[in-house]
Image: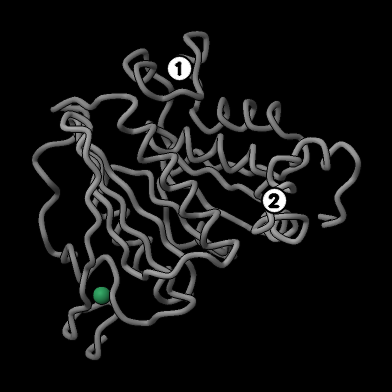
Amino acid sequence: MSTELNHEQFMRYSRHLLMDDIGELGQQKLSEARVLIVGLGGLGCPVALYLAAAGVGQLTLCDPDRVELSNLQRQILYRESDCDEYKVVCAERELRALNPHIRVNSYADEISDVLMDGYDIVVDCTDNLAARQLMNARCVADKIGFVSASALGWEGQLIAFDFAAHANLCLNCIVDKDSPEPMQNCSNSGVVGPVLGAMGSLQATTVMRMLLGFFQQHGEMQRYDGKAGRWLALAASARRDCAVCGEVA
Ligand SMILES: [Zn+2]
């Protein structure tokens, strides 16, 4: 894809181009980026919308599910008429309509190792610990960025890693891969739609920070309590015996 901005793109991205710390150079970095979004639910929808709108040059979407009526309370890419269609098909259609200058690929599949070739950043928008661990291990091995989030009820959590710059400290240092799937999830315990929107927006912002070179804190963790209206920033630490990134790995 050409990185030269044409007149239409100058207009489209003018609010980025006006900013000294993005500008034309930053916009070109965004247009050259390849980002994989895994999970097109309550988190993946805002992530995909914002990154497509921002002009991230290649977005790949991965989700095996079809749209259901109960998704519409929070999954803002879909309309009632989309029910029973694959989420990635509906999402790709919306993103192309939003921004025809970017490339969008999609897979109506569970995430697997073969689908993770050739990205700069992987964005985890699943609610599945096994998938999250698979992505984490691959991002460590490929030395790329990994931005993971989750939400339940009124609360959300984000954790982000820049494995291009740091080898130690990964998701498995914090949540061991042998730990069981949590008992509670959005399907059995509920979630507030805009809390997912807040976390998804934070994931999209974090992706842009990484692509533009502003991401500093490897292993950055943020928690949001939507009911109390509070954000909390935390720092994680590496485990030397981590089976994924540790010295024994
Ligand atoms: Zn680790």
Residue 75 drawn at (x, y percent): 41, 25
Residue at (58, 47) in percent of width and height: 60
Task: Look at discs 2 and 1 and give the one toward the viewer.
Answer: 2
Which quarter shows the C terminus?
A: bottom left
Q: In this view, which residue lies farthest toward the top?
A: 81
Residue 101 drawn at (x, y percent): 78, 41
Query: What's the distance in space between the residues labelled 2 and 1, CA to CA?
Result: 29 Å
The reply, left or right, for residue 52 in relation to residue 32 is: left
**Type of amino acid at the residue the image marks with label 1:** Asp
Label located before the other in sequence (2 or 1):
2
Q: Nearer the viewer, residue 35 or 233?
A: 233
Residue 83 position (above or below residue 48): above
**Type of amino acid at the residue the image marks with label 2:** Gly
Quarter occupied by residue 230: top left
The reply, left or right, for residue 29 in relation to residue 200 is: right
Q: Are marks 2 and 1 in contact (CB under 8 Å)?
A: no
Residue 205 drawn at (x, y percent): 49, 48
What residue is pinned by disc 2? 57
Residue 84: assigned label: 1
The reply, left or right, for residue 150 in relation to residue 28 is: left
The reply, left or right, for residue 15 in relation to residue 50 is: right
Residue 69 position (above or below residue 113): above
Residue 234 position (above or below residue 77): below
Give the secondary structure at mark 2.
Answer: loop
Residue at (72, 54) in percent of width and height: 27
Image region (quadrant) for ligand 1: bottom left
Q: Nearer the viewer, residue 28 or 116?
A: 28
Residue at (46, 54) in percent of width and height: 206
Residue 35 drawn at (x, y percent): 56, 54
Quarter occupied by residue 134: bottom left
